[in-house]
Image (tube, coloured by chain):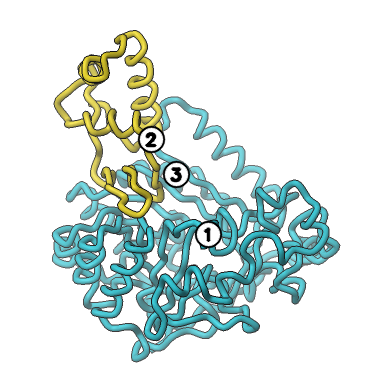
Chain colours: A yellow, B cyan
Amino acid sequence: MSVPVLPRGVRLHDDRVRNCKVLLGPERALILDETGTAILAAVDGRRSIDQIAADLAQRYSAPLEAVRPDVTNFLGDLAKRRLVDLV
Amino acid sequence: MSDIPAPIALLAELTHRCPLSCPYCSNPLEMVRGAQELPTEVWADVFAQAAALGVLQLHLSGGEPAARRDLPELVKAAREAGLYVNLITSGIGLTPARLDALEAAGLDHVQLSLQGVNAQSADKIGGYKGGFDRKMGLAGLIAERGLALTINAVMHRSNLDDLPRMIEMARELGARRIEIACVQFYGWALKNRAALQPTRAQVDEAKAIVASARADPAERLVIDFVPPDYYADYPKACMGGGWGSTGLNIAPDGTVLPCHAAQTMTHLQFPNVQTTPLREIWYGSAAFNAYRGDDWMAEPCRSCPRKAVDHGGCRCQALALTGDAAATDPVCRKSPDRAKVDALLAEGDAKGPADWAYRISPV
């Protein structure tokens, strides 16, 4: 039941020049695609990875088996880069 | 204009004044005096212009940026402009009260430089007695507040052997990230190259240490490593993505440069934010267009497939070592000037440790 949170020093930014969301952290600026934006918008410090996957599957009417690996891999990768903490 | 990307990062050298005297200082040999520094409101306007241009990350640097009394106001202005604010500091001059003010102003991240792993080594290279102890104190204050911290470890011949301890210290100090930057040879560092150039054995060992730390699944520290390029086969990419592609640098007096080392390019005229809008400088100035793309390249770069990777290498290094800013970076094995780099390396190995000249702070 790991819950993803954005640590201090990492935040989601609305880039009005490039018309996209960007994840900003120490010496990192990650330009997000739609999937990344949807996943990070769901990171609220309360929902677990599984809950986020279930919510996104429902919202986009997609099968959970297809959504869950995307969410897990994306957040797992960000956690390795310390742009997300799993608590 | 359409094929020129918007810049991502702005390095703002707020001042060249600094209590430390590191012999590899990245400031130019000719420094800007305190009286010529841009006032608060001009910097605030520059930050707004930068954000409108597409800049996402602002690095407040120096000299020592804490030497500016208006630092919290500058951080606040940058946050209001929508920028991610990173403070690159030696830590000297940051009291608990100032740190509180910076935190309240919205500072995102602190990058604290360490010159060595103990007071003896760090204070000698920084030329500032008591500096190491104050940095340790400051790191504690940063950790207490929970601010995001990167340890910036500048490595060279006399401290590269301490790398394992440096990484361990970054963990102990609560940093999430360490930037291990081997001294690159421009300006002050080039002047002191013989004293600072690590040996090949030191560099090989450092690479192995970094590789093993990164491979350790238990390692939580993000490790960024910049090896010294003289031993490389191919040059480092100019500014990551090429000249005038990703970032810009503004000197304390408002001079805008494509790179912090570019002031050596006396054949170019660098515009000033006090007289020219930043957008015009980025897209339209002769200085920013000088080495964009690859039309300026000669052989061996012109027909080389790596030109899309390294963009001909570092323009400032080409100028410093070959006298021609449009030449192939002489670090490249394909450069007709590679022998110049090899001669410098051989000279360093033959001479052994030398003394260095300290940087002198402007008033």
In x, y percent, where is residue B18?
38, 77
Q: Which residue is mark 2?
A: A33
Q: Is residue B73 left or right of residue A36?
A: left
Quick one: which residue is furthest to the front in this view?
B2
From the viewer's perspective, is residue B49 above or below residue B294? below
Across and down, in percent, residue B216 comes to 48, 28
User: Residue at point 61% right, 64% down?
Assistant: B292
**Could you classify mark 2 by the number of other residues whose Cα lies within 10 Å: few (under 14), some (14-19), or many (20 or more)?**
few
User: What is the number of the mark on residue B153?
Assistant: none
User: Which one is in front in this view, the residue at disc 1 or the one at disc 3?
Assistant: 1
Q: Earlier in the sequence, mark 1 or mark 3?
A: 1
Q: Is residue B79 left or right of residue B22?
A: left
Where is the C terminus of chain B found, in terms of image quarters?
bottom left
Disc 1 target residue: B4
- In the rendering, at what x and y percent does residue B34 appear? 35, 87
The residue where tag 3 is placed is B167
Q: Is residue B291 left or right of residue B15?
A: right
Measure the C-alpha gap from mark 3 to mark 2.
Answer: 34 Å
